[in-house]
């Protein structure tokens, strides 16, 4: 049963992702029509710089007036691949008010203001879908929201930023320092000219907020996510991880607290054992583990960014949203009924690898061990190395609260025999 | 917005999966209600042997008359976890006729008769969902049907049967033969008393048929799937694979033919390189690769069977089907518009590892090589080993059509100098 009047789609943004979306909508129009049950027509493409529009994009569809496009009144679905907070937010809200559903790849906006956007969609009986906002083509939003809708998710743990994974992978495989690896990532197009959003963990934190909110049926914004980037990871950290049979990855970790009354969300570099499947995620790939009560441990792996993979996710959402339109229904909206609070980083419980520069004299280890004990942080292993009056102590702890670890490190810095804290890194995935 | 009148659910079957479904529906009733937007009520449980019903199952809901239960007229959703063709098929069809949607975990039935079931669902404006039929809790049906609905899938390659993976993993790690490994699998509960469905590849073939149909938007039944089990895999095969830097896995492989005008689906043991991610899938775990034009290569990993994981998939579908009911809509049904034919195994193109027992005398290799050349099968490597007048030749071919390889092997058997064909195994994942 095929409807002949086409569904009209407005595309906002025509960069790497947008041009690929437009290309596939044109070349695979028949397949999309068959899967939706009605043809879809690209009715307009809003761009900032019409002179930069790529080959193959129909010139007659291009406009610089995005707002006029979403206000046209005949648009069924708006695809937003502009990114950033404004003008994307205003355009999406206006699209809902004019009866359109929205497919977005905008992690920053959804992580900052997802609740308000969902409310605007619901008020207008419209859909807001954003599979492409998290980990490119890897299905994560839909599996969490739909496949696991009858289960209880306890943990989401993964590599959700390709740029930082590429850099850390290079550091691990070549022994390079951070700057050198970043230069290579930039030269190969894996890092942007201004890499801040990636290397400081903002991009991963936005994805963590989105995943945590969906996984735990509560509201989590990017401001709730503890965030540490990779700019301070050194070649020495990587070497130290190797000695422990580990590698260093930038992880996004969303967890239900032990008694289930709160959740945590964090992004930071961490050591993980080489035997852990995430340790073998190379280059710019992404991979995410989801642990649920009944399902057990699931892993999803694939290309986490790039024009084509992101376009694949956008078009999957487009098909779903169009089907809903034809059925006169909407898909699952925001689910925040648990209203679980987000606990601060201090309450996160994990293990730590701490590297100390200490005086090479008797009694230092005893002093250091006493400080750990006084703060309730139990030591798993200590490795002591010394030469020429200088020495280092590498301490790996048992599981402890982040706040207790911070107090411990503060007290260690006070010791005369501790010359410096060379590095602190969490140990995950064990 | 919560509707107060509950949706009524009939559960057909209360074994390992069914009892877990009933348990979660009871203990997580509030969560399910919040996610669906209305309470769900277990209205009846049909079992064959009421004396065997597990603890915690409300006795007043149990009946032996499944047909009367689905005919009650007030049932919104029927969950079928009986398995097998009949009576499951008759019950599902009757359920549709009485206005219910159906969630099924029945791979055999969907793989045998999916088209008719989908037609019955559509004729009654009902849903037929069966995520649990393929690889337990691992989301595969929904990602293929929805997340990748805007993409073009070219290949599905995976380990979809936990029993056989457990057996092959044991053979690989311990050097055990097939029978010994099967005994261990049976003792540990990974293999059933009659392991035929698993070890002969029927279970995997059913899943391959379902995945191929959804991936390529065409109809594929279990009869279309080329099927070889693992009963003839020997310790020598595993050892031979190891010498090649490979391991042996039972793979389900669904492919679009080179020019896209047909598809193939097959299940057979194959050697894969140890560097391939599927090589490290241990014990009874499942993992599936999906390759699509825009998305690239995605992998999904997790527990492929068991009561809880399968129940997780059933309940995810239950939530989706209930939401559809409340919205007065149905989810995506069968998509078979490409109507691509399924090509026979002879047209599959892959590589082969062939082990020959030959006479240890000059000229044998030349004879063998001539036979390969005459049948258009190009040789990649040959390894020759000899002692005491006996010798073996191990030939690894370049990519060739299965039919050409079969003819080659037929001709090799005719050679006086070839005493026997010790093994033939396909090589995948390179």
Image (cartoon, coloured by chain):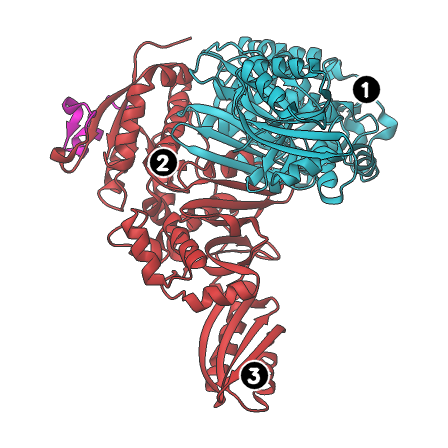
Chain colours: A red, B cyan
Question: Which residue is label 3 attached to?
Answer: A368
Q: Which residue lies furthest to the left in this view?
A: A51
Taking depth in this image into account, of A313 and B65 the one nearest to the observer is A313
State the mark number for residue A223.
none
Question: Which residue is label 2 attached to?
Answer: A310
Question: Which residue is label 1 attached to?
Answer: B64
Give the residue displayed 25% in from the left and 41% down from the top. A88
Q: Mark 1 lies on which chain?
A: B
Q: Is residue B233 visible to the viewer in this orientation of the structure?
A: yes
**Image height check: is B92 above or below A102?**
above
Secondary structure beneath dot 1 equals loop
In magenta stretch: residue A71: yes
Q: Nearer the viewer, mark 2 or mark 1?
A: 2
Q: Give me the C-alpha separation between circle 2 and circle 3.
A: 49 Å
On the image, the x and y values in percent for residue B229 come to: 71, 24
Secondary structure beneath dot 3 equals helix
Give the residue displayed 40% in from the left and 55% down from the top. A170
Q: Which of marks 3 and 1 is in front?
A: 3
């Amino acid at each position: 049963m095929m409807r002949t009047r086409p569904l009209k789609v407005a595309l906002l943004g025509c960069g790497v992702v947008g041009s690929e979306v437009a290309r596939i909508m044109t070349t695979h129009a028949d397949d999309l029509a068959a899967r939706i049950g009605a043809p879809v027509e690209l009715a307009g493409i809003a761009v900032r710089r019409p002179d930069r529009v790529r080959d193959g994009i129909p010139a007659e569809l291009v406009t610089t007036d995005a707002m006029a496009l979403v206000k046209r009144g005949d648009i069924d679905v708006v695809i937003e691949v502009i990114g950033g907070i404004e003008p994307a937010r205003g355009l999406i809200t206006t699209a809902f008010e004019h009866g359109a559903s929205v497919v977005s790849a905008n992690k920053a906006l959804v992580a900052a203001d997802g609740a308000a956007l969902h409310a605007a969609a619901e008020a207008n009986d419209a859909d807001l879908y954003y599979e492409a906002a998290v980990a490119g083509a890897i299905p994560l939003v839909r599996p969490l929201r739909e496949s696991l809708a009858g289960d209880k998710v306890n943990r989401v743990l993964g590599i959700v930023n390709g740029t930082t994974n590429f850099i850390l992978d290079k550091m691990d495989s070549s022994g390079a320092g951070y700057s050198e690896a970043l230069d290579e990532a930039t030269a190969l197009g894996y890092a942007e000219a201004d890499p801040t959003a990636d290397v400081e963990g903002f991009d991963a934190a936005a994805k963590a907020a989105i995943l945590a909110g969906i996984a735990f049926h509560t509201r989590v914004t990017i401001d709730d996510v503890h965030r540490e980037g990779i700019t301070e990871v050194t070649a020495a950290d990587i070497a130290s991880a190797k000695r422990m049979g580990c590698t260093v990855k930038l992880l996004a970790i969303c967890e239900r607290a032990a008694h289930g009354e709160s959740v945590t969300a964090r992004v930071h570099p961490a050591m993980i054992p080489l035997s852990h499947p995430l340790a073998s995620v190379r280059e710019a790939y992404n991979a995410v583990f989801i642990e649920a009560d009944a399902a057990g441990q699931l892993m999803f792996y694939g290309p986490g960014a790039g024009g084509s993979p992101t376009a694949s996710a956008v078009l999957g959402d487009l098909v779903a949203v169009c089907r809903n339109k034809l059925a006169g229904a909407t898909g699952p909206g925001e689910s925040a009924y648990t209203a679980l609070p987000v606990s601060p980083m201090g309450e996160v419980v994990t293990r730590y690898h701490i590297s100390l520069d200490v005086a090479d004299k008797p009694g230092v280890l005893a002093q250091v061990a006493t400080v750990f004990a006084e703060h309730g942080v139990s030591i798993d292993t200590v490795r002591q190395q010394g030469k020429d009056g200088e020495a280092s102590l590498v301490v790996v702890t048992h599981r402890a609260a982040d706040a207790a670890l911070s107090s411990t490190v503060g007290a260690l810095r006070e010791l005369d025999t501790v010359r410096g804290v060379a590095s602190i890194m969490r140990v995950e995935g064990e």
